[in-house]
Image (cartoon, rainbow, N blue to C red):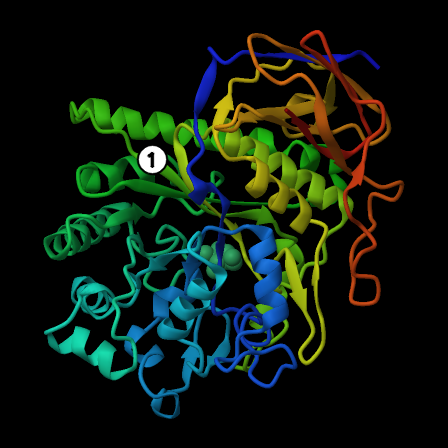
């Protein structure tokens, strides 16, 4: 196999990583909340019903911004159902997931969960712009953020939350371009509503950060035209535009699946181009940043029928995908794609956090465990902080049906404040090890601290209730740094974290 190469040089950088790139997502969907995050009576649950075993794993995962409460769920969400005395909260039909929502866990419980995670966890609150509008958005903002002395902020205090929630980041609806969305709109209808909501929210607090809905996928027929029309209305009023993408191997096309990040990078670049085009038309010096607030591997084609068969159960088992080593390698590559665009992608949320297409799984009354995908995310969140270096690979390629020739090596590198450098790299070859050579120009590191690999002789290996630690990262042999030249061999189908100090 030909050697893959790239050069790292501190003079060539992409940008600073916003910590919110390692965000996550808690939706009222399936068992993400109930028996996931929240399970009163569980042996590890605290007085508020938060599972201690899950909380420990969430901290280890290193999540930052957490989007809530949906997703498709939010387009029928009535925020006032989810606050106040639990015994008074109504049961409601959740049209998005054909489930019954008890509202036992609500806004206050979510904020309290985030506070337990730690100061790095920041709420990213989605607003219902499907069945609701400006007035309800303002009511929620006042309830959540106003310090006191008004009806809604005082009501929050009566409900036990004297301190405001301090929600800075707000999503103006969810996937409003999708015909499946309750209250689906045209770009013009949505653009106007988003602009009116944004303007009103800024009247209450000019410091809010607002995310306008972009397309729910790059394959949507209205993609790019939607973004352009929405931004035409909202450019001066919002900070971010959203992107969503899920990947799975369709029709057994594993080679294209392994190159999913090619699509993700193109998607990001297309949205950047569209934002900048609108900015140019408006003669605006402002740059819109990207919020990739739903991304993951999701075996969506297997789950579509499940939802239509539901008869309004509470917290059913839904979208509980089990992830293989191959899925983890693809997820690692998607993380690399996000880091490679850290100059414009400032928020990203792995969808979702627990049980629902999630890195953490639980059994009701039983244990919690890490899926294979937990590991690349946790490592990237831990070591991917600092400045992204511009990595241009010279790599052998392989053929894919969807993307033509794709590089076998997908890589990025991040330089931390203390000068340490971490290389994140994926070898997409299913059969061949990939020799790697990296030239370090004018960078401090002189030794390899660690080369950690996630790979397995069985690419279908996974972590399960019975065998929760079947797949974990292991140390690679033979990685060396001499005279400013890093050499390593990347195992077939592997996610690699090489730390240099
Ligand atoms: O994350 C699962 C669902 O995927 C979300 O509810 C929705 O926004 C997207 O289509």
The quarter of the picture where residue 203 lies is: bottom left
User: Tag 1: Cα neighbours inside 10 Å, few (<14), some, or many (≥20)?
Assistant: many
176 sits to left or right of 455: left
When the figure is inspected, residue 34 is found, relative to residue 491, above or below; the finding is: below
Residue at 32 percent across and 38 percent down: it is: 227
Q: Position of residue 285 (x, y in %)?
A: 19, 24
Is label 1 in a helix, a strand or a loop?
A: strand
Q: Position of residue 152 (x, y in %)?
A: 17, 75
> In this orientation, which residue lies closer to the viewer: 245 or 52?
52
Residue at 13 percent across and 55 percent down: it is: 200
Q: Position of residue 329 (x, y in %)?
A: 71, 39
Residue at 44 percent across and 82 percent down: it is: 104
Q: How many marks?
A: 1
**Camera sees residue 223:** yes
Which residue is situated farthest in the right direction here? 457
Rendered-image quadrant of the N terminus = top right
Q: Position of residue 412 (x, y in %)?
A: 59, 25
What residue is shown with label 1?
289
Rendered-image quadrant of the C terminus = top right
> In this orientation, which residue lies closer to the viewer: 434 or 131?
434
When the figure is inspected, residue 168 is found, relative to residue 313, above or below; the finding is: above
């Amino acid at each position: 196999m030909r050697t893959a190469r790239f050069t790292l040089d501190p003079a060539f950088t992409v940008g600073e990583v916003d910590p919110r790139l390692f965000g996550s997502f808690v939706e009222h969907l399936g068992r993400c909340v109930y028996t996931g995050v929240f399970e009163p009576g569980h042996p590890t649950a605290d007085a508020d019903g938060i599972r201690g075993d899950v909380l420990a794993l969430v901290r280890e995962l290193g999540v930052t911004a957490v989007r809530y409460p949906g997703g498709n769920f939010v387009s029928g969400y009535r925020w006032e159902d989810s606050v106040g005395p639990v015994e008074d909260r109504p049961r409601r039909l959740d049209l998005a997931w054909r489930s019954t929502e008890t509202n036992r866990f609500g806004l206050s419980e979510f904020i309290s969960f985030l506070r337990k995670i730690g100061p790095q966890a920041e709420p990213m609150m989605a607003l219902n712009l499907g069945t609701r509008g400006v007035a309800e958005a303002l009511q929620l903002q006042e309830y959540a953020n106003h310090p006191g002395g008004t009806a809604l902020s005082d009501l929050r205090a009566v409900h036990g939350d004297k301190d405001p929630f301090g929600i800075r980041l707000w999503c103006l609806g969810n996937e409003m371009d999708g015909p499946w969305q309750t209250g689906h709109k045209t770009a013009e209808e949505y653009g106007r509503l988003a602009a009116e909501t944004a303007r009103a929210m800024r009247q209450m607090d000019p410091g809010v950060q607002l995310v306008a809905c972009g397309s729910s996928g790059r394959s949507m027929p209205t993609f790019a035209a939607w973004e352009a029309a929405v931004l035409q209305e909202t450019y001066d009023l919002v900070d971010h535009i959203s992107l969503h993408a899920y990947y799975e191997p369709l029709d057994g096309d594993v080679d294209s699946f392994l190159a999913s990040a090619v699509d993700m990078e193109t998607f990001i670049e297309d949205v950047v181009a569209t934002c900048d085009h609108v900015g140019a038309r408006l003669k605006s010096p402002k740059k819109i940043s990207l919020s990739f607030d739903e991304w993951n591997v999701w075996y969506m084609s297997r789950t579509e029928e499940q939802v239509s068969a539901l008869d309004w159960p509470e917290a059913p088992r839904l979208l509980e995908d089990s992830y293989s080593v191959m899925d983890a390698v693809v997820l690692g590559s998607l993380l690399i794609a996000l880091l490679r665009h850290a100059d414009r992608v400032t928020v990203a949320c792995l969808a979702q956090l627990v049980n629902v297409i999630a890195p953490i799984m639980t059994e009701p009354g039983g244990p919690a465990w890490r899926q294979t995908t937990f590991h690349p995310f946790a490592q990237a969140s831990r070591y991917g902080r600092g400045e992204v270096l511009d990595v241009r690979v010279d790599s052998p390629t392989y053929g894919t049906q969807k993307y033509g020739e794709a590089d076998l090596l997908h890589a990025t590198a991040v330089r931390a404040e203390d000068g340490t450098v971490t290389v994140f790299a994926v070898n997409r070859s299913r059969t061949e090890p990939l020799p790697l050579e990296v030239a370090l120009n004018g960078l401090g590191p002189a030794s390899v601290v660690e080369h950690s690999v996630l790979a397995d002789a069985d690419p279908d290996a996974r972590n399960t209730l019975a065998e929760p630690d079947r797949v974990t990262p292991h140390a690679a042999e033979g990685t060396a740094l001499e005279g400013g030249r890093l050499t390593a061999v990347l195992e077939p189908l592997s996610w690699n974290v090489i730390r240099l100090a």
